[in-house]
Amino acid sequence: MINEGRLLDTFLEYIQIDSETGREKAMCDRLVADLKELGCIVTTDEAGKKADSDGYNIYATLPGDESLEPLAFSSHMDTVSPGKGIRPVVQDGVIRSGGDTILGGDDKGGVAAIVEAMRTVVEKKLPHRTIEGIFTICEEGGLRGAKNLDYSRIRCKQAVVLDGGGDVGKIVTSAPGQLKLTATIIGRAAHAGVAPEKGVSAIQVAAHGVAQMNLLRIDEETTANIGTFMARGATNIVSPQVQLIGECRSRNTEKLRAQGDHMVGCLKKACDAFGAQLEYQLDTIYLSYQVAEDDPLVIEIQKACSSLGITPSLVASGGGSDANIMSHNGVKAVVLSTGMDKVHTTNEQLTLQNLNDTALLALTLMKA
């Protein structure tokens, strides 16, 4: 029922609009114009000022049958780098980048699918529930757009976030929370050849602390990693300072806190043992969310998939998304897969089948 040629054209146009995180304005402006042309009630906010972006979040409403519960459809407009000058190639049913940039299917595949589903509803005058489109900035930069949404503008109490990897049909019913650890180990400089015993090596202290940490896969719902271990200096100077940046994730809030405390505790013990100082921050980036398998929204999505000949599957994710933020601001949200593959790399690709199936699933959920 969707116009597959138009959907592809829209997707190709969207991904060729540069919109790396923090520089989304051109994409925002284009999407506002398209949504207004559809007859949506469109408003925007000033989230960019808080999220360090030249863009803004978009709220678009297509009024429908008031007897039905409204549903929000959400995707983010920003991409990771390298996302400038994308030149897509369509071959053998697969859309790829030219090989020197990402493709941008994360998440413009979701954006294009929502727009095409809305266009079909309007064009064919299909009975439908009230539809809210929520399009965010800075998702790739720490979910900053979703964190600065004006939730008082969102009527819907439930949402589908079209931003998942894998073939269409995957329904992400739970995702982890994340803590970010930023730490500085302060040692004491000394001449490494003349009087090393007068120094305290921040590198040695940090290495000792990290070596004591439980990292990587902790259990089936908890992970942890150190991403930055940085110290610069001459070999003849005992290192006076090291910076560490790490994270931990878990779908269990108690485990998340315990892992964060464990990582900090290892650094504290190392500093105490060697006589160094520790400065650190342990910040909550986002909290976990979980939607029950028998939740009416989950059941409705499963039925919609089955009606299209798509096999639904319920999965738990290891990554965060705008759904994490929405779920803690009064909007029950689940993430749906859109077919994105090899995301955040120059090998990113998206099949035409998945692009079409994403739009068809969105349309099915919109219809009355």
Image: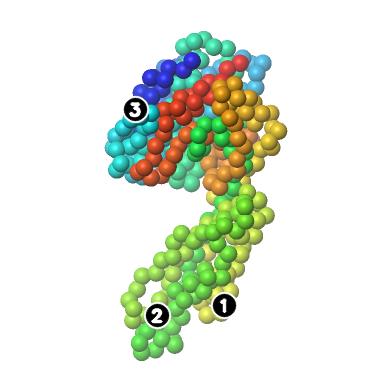
Residue ID at (55%, 62%):
215
Q: Position of residue 136 (x, y in %)?
A: 47, 35
Q: Is residue 92 left or right of residue 187?
A: left
The correct choice, above or below, for 39 with respect to 73 in the image is above
Dot 2: element? loop
First in residue order: circle 3 vs circle 2: 3
For this orientation, the residue located farthest to the front is 92
Which residue position is annotated with label 3?
13
Residue wearing tag 1: 272
**Tags 1 and 3 in contact by the CB under 8 Å rule?**
no
Kindly indicate the quadrant of the structure image that contains residue 293.
top right
Callout 3 amino acid: Glu
Q: Amino acid at mark 2?
A: Val
Q: How many marks?
A: 3
Label 2 Cα neighbours within 10 Å, binned few <14 / some 14-19 / many ≥20: many
Q: Residues within 10 Å of mark 3 (few under 14, many from 20)?
A: some
Q: Earlier in the sequence, mark 1 or mark 2?
A: 2
Disc 3 to disc 2, C-alpha distance: 55 Å
CA–CA distance between discs 1 and 2?
18 Å
Observer able to see residue 55: no
Q: Residue at x 46, y 25 (%)?
A: 356
State whether residue 341 appears in this view.
yes
- In the displayed orientation, state which residue is furthest to the bottom: 194
Looking at the rendered structure, which numbered label has been put on residue 238? 2
Distance from disc 1 to disc 3, alpha carbons, whole Å, reads 57 Å
| SS label for mark 1 | helix
Q: Residue 235 appears at what percent x and percent y?
A: 34, 78
